[in-house]
Amino acid sequence: MAELTALESLIEMGFPTGRAEKALALTGNQGIEAAMDWLMEHEDDPDVDEPLATPLGHILGREPTPSEQGGSEGSGSAAGEGKPPLSEEERQEQTKRMLELVAQKQREREEREEREALERERQRRKQGQELSAARQRLQEDEMRRAAEERRREKAEELAARQRVREKIERDKAERAKKYGGGVGSQPSPPTTEPGPVPSSPSQEPPTKREYDQCRIQVRLPDGTSLTQTFRAREQLAAVRLYVELHRGEEPGGGQDPVQLLSGFPRRAFSEADMERPLQDLGLVPSAVLIVAKKCPS
């Protein structure tokens, strides 16, 4: 029969009998090519060699023959519907065609697998590119956040420095107010060269050169000294107040009034001099004063 001839052809090509029968049955006995397609698509299935539960004759569209039912009759009970057996040359020719068909199916399968592999590789590269782009965006976001954090920290640092400078200025102003305007302010000496010291306290400084500040060094009786910068228009009383506030405690607990003397030329300043500006007393831009105990009258 045609079914048996297709089965024999598949067996001749090297397919196991059970697998060939299963392929013909599951493809509806549509020919060798359909059976071969099924065999090549399912050759790696774990259950490809498991037999079918339904009798083969029913699957192939015919009733089981007496030989399939255990009888001793030959398989040619329907010989009137069969065809003459193939000769050896015809069988070889048919086998050759089947082998060529198998080779063609194999090539088609390999080409399909190659196309699928190329598609998988394309998808893999596309996913890699997307992942790389996502990582780059993440790095750019991190760099942008880091730059913003640095700018914020810098702004906070500048604001903190400004607050410190403002506090220093407030402290200076408070000390100047507390000590008559001269205490606590330590501006640097004038960068211009100081003029000649007047030869006598009564000599007025040249009018063409004026100083806004003067640096006073006061030598105490115990050998130590105090140095402070005052404004040129401040009174000598501010210097005396500064000395009285900063000299140490004397033995015995008492604190006598301060008497100020000029070093050269030597001169003792009176109470009337205490009301005069430093520049009028010839103490600008710098001078050295000596502290002596004021003798009681």
Image (cartoon, grey):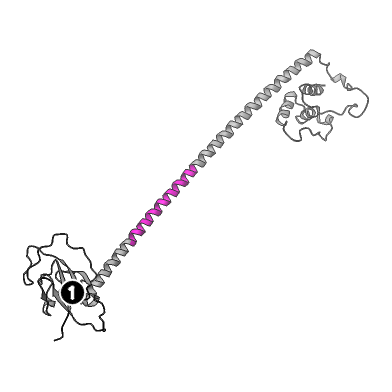
Can you say which quadrant of the picture contains the N terminus? top right
- The vertical placement of 278 against 253, above or below, is above
The residue closer to the viewer here, 279 or 111, is 279
The residue closer to the viewer here, 126 or 69, is 126
The answer to which image quadrant residue 35 occupies is: top right
**Which residue is found at the position 22% from the left and 71% from the top?**
226
- The vertical placement of 230 against 153, above or below, is below
**Which residue is found at the position 83% from the left and 30% from the top?**
56
The residue closer to the viewer here, 99 or 293, is 293
The answer to which image quadrant residue 65 occupies is: top right
Magenta includes 140?
yes
Q: Secondary structure at mark 1?
A: helix
* Residue, far front: 223
- The vertical placement of 208 against 268, above or below, is above
User: How far from the left and from the top, in percent, is residue 267?
Assistant: 10, 75
User: How far from the left and from the top, in percent, is residue 270?
Assistant: 11, 79
In the displayed structure image, the side of residue 240 where residue 157 appears, left or right: right
The residue closer to the viewer here, 217 or 164, is 217
Mark 1 residue type? Val
Can you say which quadrant of the picture contains the C terminus? bottom left
The answer to which image quadrant residue 78 occupies is: top right
Q: Residues within 10 Å of mark 1 (few under 14, many from 20)?
A: many
- What segment carries the magenta color? 133-160
User: How far from the left and from the top, in percent, is residue 156?
Assistant: 36, 59
- Return the residue at label 1: 239
Magenta includes 179?
no
- The vertical placement of 192 against 123, above or below, is below
In the displayed structure image, the side of residue 55 where residue 278 appears, left or right: left
User: How far from the left and from the top, in percent, is residue 137?
Assistant: 46, 45
Magenta region, main secondary structure: helix
In the displayed structure image, the side of residue 180 where residue 156 appears, left or right: right
